[in-house]
Amino acid sequence: MTGPDLTLALDSDAGAYVAVHDRLDEPSADVGLSSRELDVRRATRDVAARVLAPLAAEFDRTHEFTHVGVQALATAGLGGLVFPPHLGGTGDSNVAYAVAMEEVAAACPSTSLVFMTQMHAAYPILLAGDDDLQRRYIPGLLDGSAYGSLGITEPDAGSDVSSLATTATATDQGWSVSGQKTFITTGDRADVIICFATVDRTRGRDGITAFVLEGDWDGVSRGAPFAKLGMHGSSTAELFLDDVQVPRANLLGTEGAGWKVVMSSVVKSRISAAAQGVGIARAVYARTLLTLRALHGPRLPDDLTFALAEMRGQLLEGRLLLHAVARQVDHDSAVSAGQIGIMKQRCTDLGFRAAVTAVGLLGAYGDLADVGVERYLRDAKVTQIYDGTNEIQRLLIGREITRAMEDIL
């Protein structure tokens, strides 16, 4: 038993891929996009159709790193959407970045994870690095000639960044950094590592400091990539730092300011994760619709039509939420953690829930690799976990509710 031909066309026919996704765009979401943002979506969808979608299933099967996909996006000028032109970017809005991420994730979630990690590594340098650091490291991350990683998570410090055990000890030339990082995206091959360490554990978050490390420096070693449920075209590995000598020039911001760098950076990373959720939901919806049409013809049973109507409505809600919060970030740097958390939690839950629903609607076909829905189900799960688990997002949202109630009462 193989998947219906209509669904397989999404992986093999660029024209069919674009036509399907163009047809399923929602005017009520698109009306808020500028002409430039629509152009960015068109350009990204073209790369997705020609390069990403045809390779996605193979990356999943072989666990091959999606270098080809990242290079195709960089070549198309999409690697630096929110970065200034003098560093190799295009100076676009966060909304443009969000719609681009939607397109990449809809075609190949693994590529979207590597693609967004490039931005996540470059953004702290833009945020807190001096001109020399920016010019040394950001252009390579944007044009794909260098891979980057964020070195935050540790075996005993995940969502609680203030409890980091990696230490940075002052030396005459800068700092000596030692510790272990885990679950690091692209960690096995990163050329540029944004490393967060503490200069004094007794200071808690006030001791957290950010540095730019290079992957080939003495004392930097990596573990083998983890075997994972999904996102097989993206590698995740441990980093080991043993007396790594970091020059003073590679300090990001000031000593003890790393917590602020983390908190400012997660706004961008949570837009990325939310866009992945929406993109995955879109892909699942398209594949489910085409598979059911191939099985039943253009007139579907009412129960299936009702389920698709529910899925379409939820997808539109997610798209509108993603675009609205990204637009708010463009216009207001003081967007709250709870507002960002609502977007991240709702949109990533959407992607996973849509995939679970699709597998149920398709029955035996939902289990087939050729149809592809099972791959999106596996890929979607991790989006609920990284960039702050959705449980942490609910905690942040709840804290804001409590503060608002105190202010009201």
Image: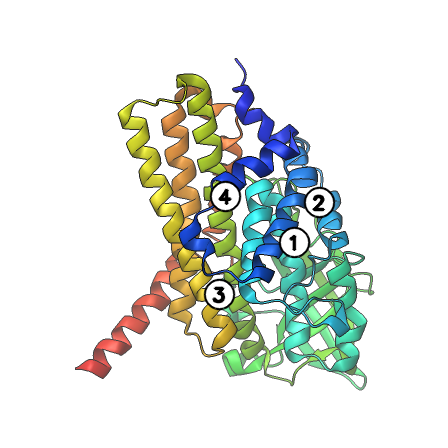
Left or right: residue 138 compared with residue 374: right
- Cα separation, mark 3 vs mark 1, equals 18 Å
Residue at screen point 61% across, 44% down: 110
In which quadrant is the C terminus drawn? bottom left
Q: Nearer the viewer, residue 201 or 13?
A: 13
Q: Earlier in the sequence, mark 3 or mark 4?
A: 4
Q: Which residue is mark 4?
A: 280
The amino acid type, in three-letter code, at marker 4 is Ile
Q: Earlier in the sequence, mark 2 or mark 3?
A: 2
- Cα separation, mark 1 vs mark 2, equals 9 Å
Residue 114, horizontal then vertical, whole percent: 65, 51
Q: Earlier in the sequence, mark 4 or mark 2?
A: 2
The amino acid type, in three-letter code, at marker 2 is Gly
Q: Given contact means CB atoms under 8 Å apart, are the residues at marks 1 and 2 in contact?
A: yes
Q: Which residue is mark 3?
A: 326
Q: Nearer the viewer, residue 395 or 80?
A: 80
- Total labels: the figure holds 4
Left or right: residue 318 compared with residue 165: left
Note whether 88 is above or below 78 in the view shown.
below
Q: Tell me the crowding category of disc 3: few under 14, some 14 to 19, or many 20 or more residues within 10 angstroms, Cα based.
A: many
Q: Nearer the viewer, residue 183 or 136?
A: 136
Q: Secondary structure at mark 3?
A: helix
**Circle number at residue 115:** 1
- Cα separation, mark 4 vs mark 2, equals 17 Å
Q: Which residue is mark 2?
A: 69
